[in-house]
Image: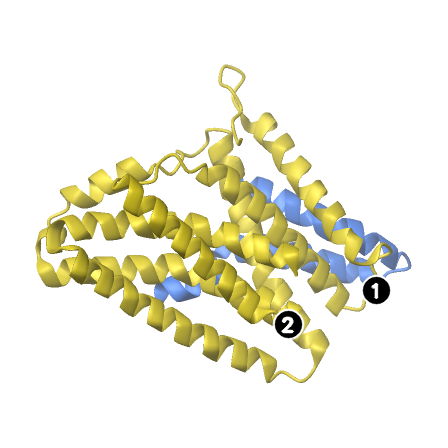
Chain colours: A yellow, B blue
Amino acid sequence: MIAAVITTFLTASVEWVEAYTIILAVALSIGWRRALGAAATALVVLALLTGIGSFALTRIGDFAILQLIIGVFLTLFGVRWLGKAVARGAGLKKLHDEDVAFASLRASKAINEARAAWFIAFNGMLLEGLEVWLIVVALGVQTHHTLAAAGAAILALIVVAAAGALARKPLSHVPENTIKFVVGAGILSFGTFWVLESLGYHWPLGDVTLLALFGFYGLGGLLLVRLYTPKTAKAGVI
Amino acid sequence: MQGFIKTLFGDTSTLAVTAGAIFAAVLVLHSPVPALAGAVLPLGLLAGAAYLARR
């Protein structure tokens, strides 16, 4: 359960930081009240989706099928995040820069139109929150701690909101790629473990295997970063 | 809706590498050496992440 809560908190932190940049950019155009209203509406949609998703998954009577579905979705998510973090760490892709994202949003024409700006804030919050939703539902249902997972996501939201209120500028100092790398390795470990277990495989070390898988993906990912980094550049996931 | 589907499934490359790794693990699981499935899936997925990073 602790691993699931930490993973959810870290995933949510990264996504809320990106959402905060969008809300901040919109708030400077249409005011904090309307921008926060759009964000709150998106959060209500996400809360409804969490309820529907959890309900639908818990209706599945066969535990192995439930485990396989959740395992596959987590694997898809984890392999994507780990691949992206490796690419950014090795310099194959640009690091996500909140200052650049903020400046690009502020330069767009749509942000100066009240209704369009409201939808930018709503869509931004919803799209960033969908990844949080996936992790809360998947890890929550599988570990029977949906409320704890949802609590971790809300705690991350509070922490990011507080940091944003203090900083009043994009939170560009958050090491997003490092967090994505760790979360990608963690989620991929959960996904791998549950996919194979649902197919009838018996992990020799039981739950301890999760730690071994995390170590494997973490070290393997670091090795890939080193391998992919051009000899003239410096590897930098961390 | 597009964002929702992308969040759940990723793009076609992500789907392909994940499906490939799971398929290989299932084949090994039903072979004379099923214990190796525990190594095949992580290795396949790490190779998949490596491919996605290079793409």
Image coordinates of residue B53 in percent, x first then y, are 52, 39
Seen in the picture, residue A167 relative to A62 is either above or below; the reply is above
Q: Which mark is residue A199?
A: none
| Amino acid type indicated by mark 2 | His
Query: What residue sits 51% from the left and 37% below the top?
Result: A178
Chain of the residue under label 2? A
Q: Nearer the viewer, residue A198 or A133?
A: A133
Image coordinates of residue A117 in percent, x first then y, are 16, 57
Query: What residue sits 68% from the left and 59% below the top?
Result: B22
Q: Indicate the secondary structure of the residue bearing disc 1.
A: loop
Q: Which residue is mark 1?
A: B30
Seen in the picture, residue A119 relative to A227 is either above or below; the reply is below
- Which image quadrant is residue A118 in? bottom left
Please count the marks in the image.
Answer: 2
Query: What residue sits 64% from the left and 57% below the top?
Result: A2
**Could you tell me which quadrant the N terminus of chain A lies in?**
bottom right
- Can residue B16 be seen by looking at this rendering? no
Q: Which residue is mark 2?
A: A144
Q: Indicate the secondary structure of the residue bearing disc 2.
A: loop
Q: Nearer the viewer, residue A70 or B20?
A: A70
Seen in the picture, residue A175 relative to A15 is either above or below; the reply is above
Q: Nearer the viewer, residue A50 or A92?
A: A50
Separation of marks 2 and 1 at Cα, in angstroms: 30 Å
Q: Work out which residue is located at the far top of the displayed protein and give it.
A: A232
A190 sits left or right of A105 in the view: right
Image coordinates of residue A16 in percent, x first then y, are 38, 52
- Can residue A113 be seen by looking at this rendering? yes
Chain of the residue under label 1? B
In this rendering, which labeled residue sits more in front, label 2 or label 1?
A: 2
